[in-house]
Image (tube, rainbow, N blue to C red):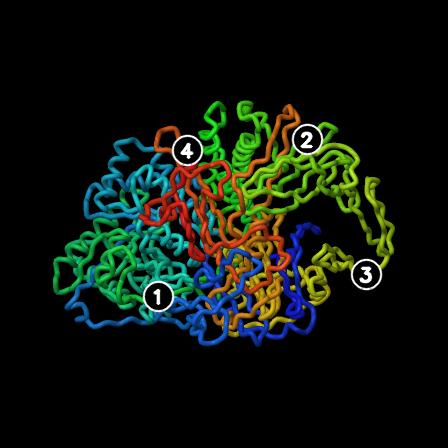
Amino acid sequence: MAPFLKRVSTSSSITRACSGLTSVGMTPLKRGGRFCNLSLQSAGPILRHLVEVSTLPKNLLREPASRGWPLVLLEEPVRCPEADDRQGTTDLTAVEPSLEGASSPVPYRCRAAAGNFMLDVYDLLSFDNPDGGVWKQGFDISYQDNEWDNEPLQVFVVPHSHNDPGWLKTFDDYYRDQTQHILNNMVVKLHEDSRRKMIWSEISYFSKWWDNIDEQKRDAVRRLIESGQLEVATGGWVMPDEASTHYSALIDQLVEGHQWLERNLGVKPKTGWAVDPFGHTPTQAYLLRQAGLSNMLIQRVHYTVKKHFASQKTLEFFWRQNWDQDSSSDILCHMMPFYSYDVPHTCGPDPKICCQYDFKRLPGGRISCPWRIPPQAITDNNVQERAQTLLDQYRKKSKLFRTNVLLVPLGDDFRYTEAVEWDQQFDNYQKLFDYMNSHPELHVQAQFGTISDYFEALRKSTGMDPVGINVGQLALPVLSGDFFTYADRDDHYWSGYFTSRPFYKRLDRVLESHLRAAEVLYSLTLANIQKYGQPNDYPSVDNYKLLTEARRNLGLFQHHDAITGTGKDWVVVDYGTRLFHSILNVKRVIVSSAHWLVLKDKQTYFHDPSNPFLQMDDVQPSQDALPRKIIFEVHEKPRLLVVYNPTEQARMSMVTVYVTTPKVRVLNALGHVVRAQVSAVWNDASHAAADVFQLSFVAQAAPLGLSVYQLMEGMEPRTEAAKYMFLQDGRQISVSELEHFRQFYQQDAAPVHIENPHLKLSISTATGLLEKMRLKEDDSEDLVKVEFVLYGTTSNKDKSGAYLFLPDKEATILLNECVQPRKTMAKLPLQANFYPMTSMVYLQDSSGRLSLLTAQSLGAASLKSGQLEVIMDRRLNQDDNRGLGQGVLDNKITANSFRLLLEKRSSADENEETAPYSYPSILSHMSYMYLNHPLISMAVNQRSDNPSLTPYSPLSASFPCDMHLVNLRAIQSKEEGGGPSEQAALILHRKGFDCGFSNRNTGLLCTTTRGKIHLEKLLTDLKVKSITPVSLSLMHTHNSDADPQEISLKPMEIRTYRLQLS
């Protein structure tokens, strides 16, 4: 079996018909156990051309205007806005691209950043796979013996142990069996010899170990760090996946790790270390740079790209954001040249030789060399030959780089567990180093080092600034772009994991959204409590502990074998259980915080955890089940409903709750009746529930605010009952329990129409899927066609698994009446054309754009012009030989969630086709926000006396449309007890947007302000006590002469401030 897949496309009649009016919500349905979702697909002869879209990386799939639609895959935040603040005006309806010094009359646009784009690299490569000899995926390397006579080779051997926080075992089992022993031995063995070094990166493990060791051992660790023997690299909670993760969760796990380090060790990481994520995104590079790191290392990059970079000596480069106008986002990056990060693939090009220098594989041990030549312990008799053989590998490897400084990692998964391995590796290598260093005729200086030792020496050798990027004449090239989709050999593209275990990819976003909502509400509550004094029992410490646990569970799930869906079944359940418990816990934080904020008389606040004042409107029964709606009893006495808007924009959005009567009145806080609709709740296709009804109304919600509504039983003309139409199709249909609703029956197969003031949809009665869209603004119509298709796996020995997608042929149709033939491209196989869709994907031409916004990360492709495919689920009977050792058979019913947005270009941009970036419209950003951060409804508990509640509005106005509040995250107190301090981290992101789309009738309740916010003026009752600009994860404080109250962000920028409200 293989992926269930949704295919979307649209005919080019869309060129007449784009509009920023209305997005179409997608409702999951279940058909016969298959996972389905609403989507689009084109009819008509317009789907002609398929260009080699596949040759481009994830950032941008694009084709010339003459050929129809480019596909752009977006992964925020790394997209280009207008070059400076020309995109912003005070009134969104008046956004005009402006001209400045342009020699031709085209709208002003970002100039391309200097340097090379991965787009161009992919164009150059033929993606053939010739046998390279001992370096199978590379080429033969030679050198002259005298090359190092004037400047000796400087070798840094960097011991490391890659500890997956869950994969074949759970996080706790790995810790118990391996990780704690690695760290315990590290303290002893590094102390034995000051020349020994080690790096560590996963703080999830390090913090667990720290909690279990005594103060004497902690002091020993601090001394190792101070002496430079132990380095913390990256310092995030995990080494995250870079394809399926959302940037806000990447930030969160980085902040969690760096805050832990600041509190416990006073350490500030300088260098990123990412040896195992399956492809790399410039978003991660940007976040590391914003956090104050200067260098980074990556490993899993397509073998053809590695070979090309090695041949050009560009494996070390400054990685720059596509949209960056100068070098402010640059970070120095080292790409490892060979197949893997293990010892056979790190000392040089010949794994048969390098394996002989992995002294854990000495004869008599548990692992050996697959090339059948074992390592030899180093003695006086063999040291000369062994050192020269190793030096030959070092020299060959160094020929792939521009300097005489060489990095040689020494480690693998869960290495250095036993004391004997420390001795085997460190003692034998020290003998080799001593020999090399004592023979000046070899012209080499070799030593153990940390990753930052290496980068410091590299920078020194090129005359660079020791940590920054002020390099004068760049000694190394500049590169922009990303490294997806990864292949490690042959046609083995790792595009399967973009969708594997989609239930948990969705659950990840549910926790992400609820955690952010809880963080913001909690921080506002603490500030409010300070303002009102402390006569209450608000559980600030308990809530902070729940938030901390949720941050860590979400952070753990960003690991590259967690959100990717590439762990063992029981490990997936362990992750799912952690996510599930944290969703329950952050809901407790939201409920107790909202309770305090809406209470008119704060003195009456009473916290009862077993009987909370407010009750959420849904509950998830277990880690692998979909949430169920709670049924609210409604009587003549008003039942109060509190609605929380977690976004920084005022909005009008639909609220839907389940109630016990069809006769309901809805009143707002002023006592005015609100228009509402009552619908049936269906037990199955023909049986409605007799005692449960769905109540829907449009709530008006202040930014970050809490609205209050009353529900009461009674007849109300402004509450309408839904109408139901049944398609008989010649058969007799009997429907029960519908006496409260009007019903009518349709005999023929004419399409069903659904419409609102902006839009009319035609839906097929045969399939229940969308067929046409009519936009009322200009009465234009688009043909659409949806089909569900299935890929099988290949009959070759290597088959699809959790990581790999190896389809047998083009997809076959599951649910429709025709299939379009697909042309296979010569240059790349079909599976190479799938990319991770983290937030949205769009098809566009010169006059319009169709965007698919997503609330979960999935794999997506555009294999034909005007067509989109999104892989919805995967079921795999077999392993794909990447270490997991099982297939993927634990499928769950998954409520994937999407929005479809059709927009009309109001101004064409001639540079659009050639720019190395693209970005969404403001409306698209907003729709994405609403989809991923829905309103949260809570009802006052039946058992509570109806106290006096008042709406809560912390802001006097919406944030500017392009300013996103990524988080307002309470910072832990330095005092014992694990409670909050009086400060919070305010993290803001200014979104880049395309001004070329119509802003008429968008319904947006915000403006843009050229990236400026005056925070105190936006707050209603709180004051800013202090605000300090800091690095992304609060490690470094930025000195600034500017008024700290006036926040100013460049387009695309993410900034953090240390904020104290009072």
Residue hosting label 3: 750
Amino acid, disc 4 = Pro
Residue hosting label 4: 980
Amino acid, disc 3 = Ala
Residue hosting label 2: 639
Task: Confirm or deny contact between disc 4 and disc 1 (CB under 8 A).
Answer: no
- Residue 794 visible, this orientation: no
- Closer to us: mark 4 or mark 1? 4
* Earlier-in-chain disc, 2 versus 3: 2
Q: Residue at x 52, y 74 (%)?
A: 826
Q: Relative to 631, is 394 above or below?
A: below
- Closer to us: mark 2 or mark 1? 2
Task: Confirm or deny contact between disc 2 and disc 4 (CB under 8 A).
Answer: no
Q: Relative to 599, is 685 above or below?
A: below
Total numbered badges shown on the rendered structure: 4
Residue hosting label 1: 478
Q: Residues within 10 Å of mark 1 (few under 14, many from 20)?
A: many
Q: Position of residue 61 (x, y in %)?
A: 52, 67
- Closer to us: mark 2 or mark 4? 2
Left or right: residue 415 versus residue 250 is: left
